[in-house]
Amino acid sequence: MQINLKPVFVNKAPSSTLAINEDVQKRWASGKRVLHMGFGESRFAVHEKLQRALQAHACAKSYMPSQGLPELREAVAAYYSDKHHLLFNADQVLIGPGSKALIYALQLALDADLFLPSPSWVSYAPQAELLGSRIFYVPSRVDDGYSFDLKAFAVTLEQSSNPNKLLILNSPNNPTGHMWSESSLRELAEFCREHNILVISDEIYFLVEHGKVKHKSIAKFYPEGTFILGGLSKHLSIGGWRVGVALLPDSESGKLLMQAVKVIASEIWSSVAAPIQYAALQAYSHDPEIEAYIKTCSRIHGIRTKFLYQKLTELGISCTKPLGAFYLTANFDAWADPLREIGVESSAQLARYLLDQHDLATLSTDAFGIPEKTLSLRLATSYLDMEKDEDSQRLTSLLASGVSEQEFMSEANHPNTHAAIGEFEKFVERCNDAYTSAARAL
Ligand code: PMP
């Protein structure tokens, strides 16, 4: 029987982050060594109180309202009001099966051209492609740490004749680990207001701060045009539970959009699983133990990601400085010549080479909207030395025992992180040797 796909699905591959993870799992299953930096999944154990809350509601079997369990929406509104120092009510909140599905639902509901900072998380653009929306990347510079430039944004806007425009922001950022400062958010908010641009503020990592820089939401400066997205996948390591939240503006337009997204929810996923919604109540209840656990996990992400940043920088690899989440973007353009000699001319080829030759699983940044010839890779620290629940439990107890950060990051405690850095060192030496022999041959 012949199956005819819609043109948008022809030659379309599944999300590159999920694909690399499946590839790594297969290599592990066949006994191969892989130092996994390709997948951003927080690996801490499910907090005991959340486990108990889920067990206690295993018998909740009815469909829930499409917008979400009312008590959970109340709790989410109160939680965000407290954390963001803004006032939200339960009618503004929608609960969905992960923030990914909610971002898709918003893109489906809004008739707008999509603007994305370069780099941007891998799924925003493919979602827009599935919907037939036009996508415009705002260019950035590697040597400027990919910072968002308002002038470049203004120039990019001129390419679109659609009066309806949507920007997706993400702070803390996947793939750079950057966080937007209050002053740049304020400036961007004024710009968006002036140009009538709606903003999806993807704040899924907002509680994964590394310490010094505190998360700020553009909603503070642009409440009427901002849709906040979040969930429990990152700071509580329960991506598989599929809990996402959206907070829409408290206005007539916000209500109109909520109505449209409720139509989508009711026609596609009906509601998030009932036991999960009851258990999620616990996560949004300001429980001091859970709040402390979130802080501990984020601190550990911070220590590990900053360690990788420091070591790679010492090797001469140019990296974005991580302030939140568990990523950094590393650039290898400095070795473009020797890499070309061995057939590596794009970030995808570089990622493949590192996996084949050095057992390093990384993600090429072309999927994030960075030109493919730029030799940049996204490195995630969340999996290294946390492959199993026992590993993350061991590391959490170790930090709680009061060891220094140096001891915490020692080779004995983080063997795979050290092995990965060792492989990068070998790779850089190879590239530098190629330069030296080329210079000698002259
Ligand atoms: N936004 C960003 C930036 C992400 O990194 C992810 C997960 N990798 C998501 C959204 C989606 O998370 P979830 O669907 O689990 O809420």
Image (cartoon, rainbow, N blue to C red):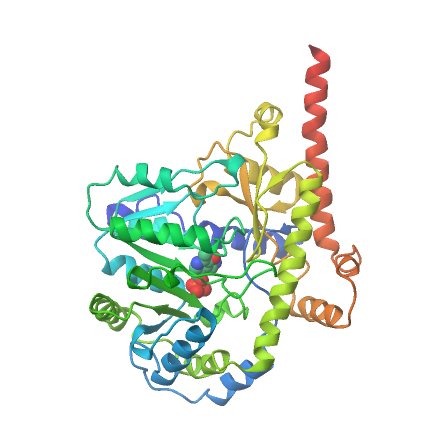
Whether residue 7 is visible to the viewer of this picture, yes or no, is: yes
* Front one among 415 and 295: 295
Residue shown at 32%/49% (left/top)?
191
Q: Position of residue 163 (x, y in %)?
A: 19, 47
Total marks in image: 0
Q: Which quadrant holds residue 42?
A: bottom right
In the image: residue 418, left or right of residue 50: right
Instruction: Give the quarter the ligand 1 occupies.
Output: bottom left
In the image: residue 178, left or right of residue 76: right
Residue shown at 40%/88% (left/top)?
60
In what quadrant of the picture does the C terminus appear? top right
Please say if 281 is above or below 143.
Answer: below
Q: Position of residue 66 (x, y in %)?
A: 29, 76
Q: Position of residue 353 (x, y in %)?
A: 59, 37
Whether residue 33 is visible to the viewer of this picture, yes or no, is: no
Q: Position of residue 119 (x, y in %)?
A: 45, 44
* Front one among 175 and 138: 138
Please say if 23 is above or below 210.
Answer: above
In the image: residue 26, left or right of residue 97: right
Please say if 438 is above or below 208.
Answer: above
* Front one among 207 and 393: 207
